[in-house]
Image (cartoon, helix red, strand yellow):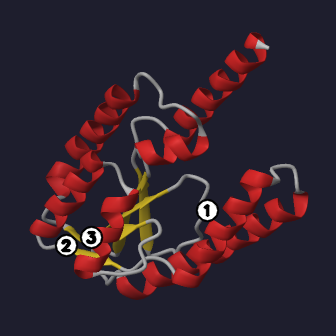
Amino acid sequence: MGRMLIQIPRFYSKDEFKNISASIPEDYAEKSEEYWNYIEEKIRPLMKHIKKVYLEALVKDGEEGIKIAEKIFDPKGLRIFKALLENGAKLQVTEDPSLIMEASSWQDIMQNKPDFGVIIEMLQENLKERDNYITKTIDKTLKDNETGLLVIETAHKFDFPADIKVIKMCRFDPSDYLNIFLQKQRLKESHSQ
């Protein structure tokens, strides 16, 4: 049968919207509910089959991992992850802490100097390193005939071994939702000047 990995894009939390923009989309609650309801509906038949849960920026497992996830993920997504854990899935360390800290530093610098090309290049290089780390971690920990769930930003690109069947699942791309919102914000600002 091989290994199967269900990959779903991470939906941005309200705090992430606040860090990027001064406001939150008016339809945030509705979109978040729509997104996670779709994911929950699709995953429900697989609940007992998913054995590993991999979450973006997760550098600890167990209770510590759950506390990290609570800070990063939308409550509706957390409800699904916790249901998977209750059904026997294991929360898996997904990322290297030093690479996460580096990414955070580059992002902080970019907020102050968004047009600085070298910073963008360094952040992209960091993303590649994180992708490689995640790929190796999943390859090592997802056993034969196991199914895993990976929740991660769509900017990540992976080159998984051929025996890992990847199924991408989403109602809509959360990064598109974020980018459209930000573009509308910029247009409003430019028209008000």
Identify the residue under disc 3: 66
- The picture places residue 47, in percent across and down from the top left corner, at 16, 59
Q: Residue at x 59, y 76 (%)?
A: 101
Identify the residue under disc 2: 89
The reply, left or right, for residue 118 in relation to residue 84 is right
Inspect this view and state whether residue 1 appears.
no
Q: Name, please, the residue furthest toward the bottom.
A: 140
Question: Are the residues at dot 3 and dot 2 in contact (C-beta closer than 8 Å)?
Answer: no
Q: Secondary structure at mark 2?
A: loop
Q: Earlier in the sequence, mark 1 or mark 2?
A: 2
Q: Earlier in the sequence, mark 3 or mark 1?
A: 3
Q: Is 114 situated above or below 89? A: above
Q: Secondary structure at mark 1?
A: loop
Q: Which mark is residue 129?
A: none
- The picture places residue 152, in percent across and down from the top left corner, at 47, 59
- The picture places residue 165, in percent across and down from the top left corner, at 42, 66
Inspect this view and state whether residue 63 appears.
yes
The amino acid beneath tag 2 is: Ala
Q: Earlier in the sequence, mark 3 or mark 2?
A: 3
Q: Is 162 situated above or below 155? A: below
The amino acid beneath tag 1 is: Lys
Identify the residue under disc 1: 157
Q: Residue at x 75, y 71 (%)?
A: 125
